[in-house]
Image (cartoon, helix red, strand yellow):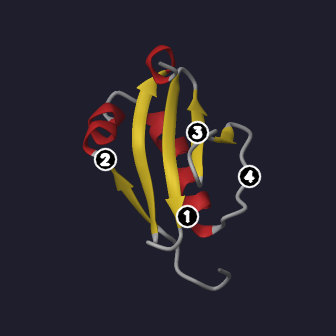
Amino acid sequence: MAGSSPLAVNYRKTAFFNARNLSAAHKRSLRTVLSGVAQDPKYRHNNLKPLKGVKNGFRLRLGDWRVSFVRDAKEGIIDVFEILPREKAYR
């Protein structure tokens, strides 16, 4: 996919509302990682791991918060479907 435009980032309603609770530093970090993933399918980050059982799904650790998303190059989007505090993310 070299030379193609970056993917658009789509936040589901609940993820968008929960993102309001993130600190400014966490919001910057989230934008940085999502922009890296959107531009490069092989983007690496220490706190980014694949989700088990979710095709093209990833989990990002932001302090006590967890962000789950799916990278869909075919549709041209990154779908952020969950932003939750750690204690609620693994239930």
Residue at mark 4: 44
Q: Which residue is pictured at 51% across the width and 19% down the height?
A: 86
Helix or strand or loop: what does disc 4 sit on? loop
Asked if residue 27 can be seen in this view, the reply is yes
Give the residue type at disc 1. Ala
Furthest toward the bottom, the residue is 3
Instruction: Report x, y in % for residue 62.
Output: 56, 31
Furthest toward the top, the residue is 87
Q: Which residue is pictured at 44% across the width and 18% down the height?
A: 88
Would you place residue 34 above or below residue 28 in this image? Answer: below
Mark 2 → mark 3, Cα distance in angstroms: 15 Å
Mark 3 → mark 1, Cα distance in angstroms: 14 Å
Residue at mark 3: 59
Helix or strand or loop: what does disc 1 sit on? helix
Instruction: Report x, y in % for residue 37.
Output: 60, 59
Mark 4 → mark 2, Cα distance in angstroms: 24 Å
Helix or strand or loop: what does disc 3 sit on? strand
Would you place residue 27 above or below residue 2 in this image? Answer: above
Q: Which mark is residue 12?
A: 2
Q: Earlier in the sequence, mark 3 or mark 1?
A: 1
Give the residue type at disc 3. Arg
Residue at mark 1: 38
Instruction: Report x, y in % for residue 43.
Output: 70, 58
